[in-house]
Amino acid sequence: MYQKRNSGWMKHLDFMLMDLICLWGAYFMAYYVRYQKFIPFQEEKFINMFQVFFFCHMFVTLFNNSFKNVLKRGTWREITSALKQVILVVMSATFYLFATRGSTNYSRITIFVTAWFYFLLTCMTRFLWKAFLRWQGIKGAKKRTLVVMTTAGMAEEVVEQLRVNRFNGLRMVGLALMEDGASKWVGQEMNGIPVVADAATVAEYVCQEWVDEVFISLPREIPFPEQIYSELVGMGVTVHLHILRAMKLEGQEQNMGRLGAYTVLSSSINMVTTGQAFCKRLMDIIGGLLGCILTAILCIFVAPAIYIKSPGPIFFTQERVGRNGKKFKLYKFRSMYMDAEERKKELMEQNQIKDGMMFKMEHDPRIIGGEHGIGGIIRRFSIDEFPQFWNVLKGDMSLVGTRPPTVEEWEKYDLHHRVRLAAKPGITGLWQVSGRSGITDFEEVVKLDKTYIMDWTMGLDIRILLKTVKVVLMGDGAY
């Protein structure tokens, strides 16, 4: 959701956990070497030593910032870093045992052999894990997409510099060349990256394609594209600006960081920490699991009722547009007749939403059994939305977010409408609990969605969920 602002040890939690496992493994191996036994928990003193190693490891890792820039460290620097970690942990443990006057009760051989195995295991694990991350990046596992705005003369250098660091989690999908006459290069490739736009078309390209972030690196002789920059940030796209061209606009947050070899100022309409993103995803997983269980129970009663009134599939699937233009399949209980999509074209004149940016009408004849039939009931109490908990569990959606548009609706978006796609779509959201049955102005929907994205907190999500339960129980459905 939005631009993530990583903090401290949370950024490399995987390395921290693997290092701790290496320490425990080393302790078990050292105990076996000393006593020819596998389980060191038969005596209380060895249980205590196990606990001392654990707390010393946590203390050293957190306060020494042991994994800072771990992904950028070379072989020799990694070896010295691992050696430093081992020495600090063992010295901390020895000092603690000495200070508590318990050092004479413990095996010094076990401590020193633990240190030796710990050093070997942690070096091997770090090298293997970094090799895996490099392989994962090379195989195209990077999920966030990046468009680079630059010039033809700088393109090769910029692309190469961004490729040097494989751990940004970004995949370059296109170049936008900003000098006059750049349209002649559109459709060609530079350093293996396609040229997808020029200054006149880059904002439209970002609006219509799946683009998560944009990096702007321009020479001083090229006027800064202030309007394009403002439009991109206004869409909800994270924009990384080469620090020499940095500027500040109202209604955005900025964060200093690195992108490849460049120092950049990243601008977004909101930024969240790794901890906040973790809490939101954890809430989604728990809610998704519970929702899927409820969906399975509801299916026992809803499925036969739907099939009896309208034979055909119980579930309705539709391609929707998610965060930053990523398309996914959305699932619902089918509440309309099988020909609903075909009949929608005939009913567009009765659409209550201006400009046809969404579709909503009262007394929709496509609903199975009408408003008082099975289709109307499951829509009024939002039962048809329950299969979307599977989308939440998969990661396509969140419990709370913005409602995902259809592809047809998305293709009609103006640039400022794209801000709705800056966040992961949700089953419910701010505009749904702010009078969802009464809002017929799409611009008002966009305004509420933008407010949610800019003001997002975990507390806001919880308040929206509580209001959603109230609204659903009152029977004000039909998202």
Image (spheres, grey):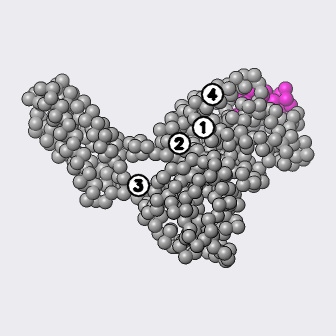
The amino acid beneath tag 2 is Val
Label whose residue precedes the other's in the sequence (3 or 1): 3
Residue at the location (47% across, 69% down)? Answer: 160
How far apart marks 4 and 2 lie (CA) works out to 18 Å
Instruction: Please name the amino acid that badge 3 sits on.
Output: Leu
Please name the residue that numbered disc 3 is placed on: 133
Residue 212 placement (x, y as % from top left)? 59, 54
- Along the polypeptide, which appears first: circle 1 or circle 4? 1
Residue underneath mark 2 = 272
> Is 28 on the left or on the right of 411, as rendered?
left
Please name the residue that numbered disc 4 is placed on: 463
Can residue 384 be seen in the rendering of this structure? no
- Write down the region rendered in magenta: 368-385
Q: Residues within 10 Å of mark 3 (few under 14, many from 20)?
A: some
Left or right, 29 with reference to 213: left
- Of the numbered discs 4 and 2, the one sitting upstream in the chain is 2
Element type at marker 1? loop
Q: Secondary structure at mark 4?
A: helix
Which residue corresponds to the image point at 64% horizontal and 64% vertical from the top-left? Answer: 225
Residue 369, magenta (yes or no): yes
Q: Under tag 3, what secondary structure?
A: helix
**Looking at the figure, which quarter contains the C terminus?**
top right
Cβ atoms at labels 1 and 2 below 8 Å apart: yes
- Give the Cα separation between the discs numbered 3 and 1: 31 Å
Residue 127 horizontal/vertical position (percent): 31, 55
Query: Mark 2 and mark 4 in contact (Cβ < 8 Å)?
Result: no
Please name the residue shown 81% across and 30% down the image. Answer: 376
Cα–Cα gap, marks 1 and 4: 11 Å
Whole-number angstrom distance, CA of label 3 to CA of label 2:
24 Å
Name the amino acid, label 4.
Answer: Arg
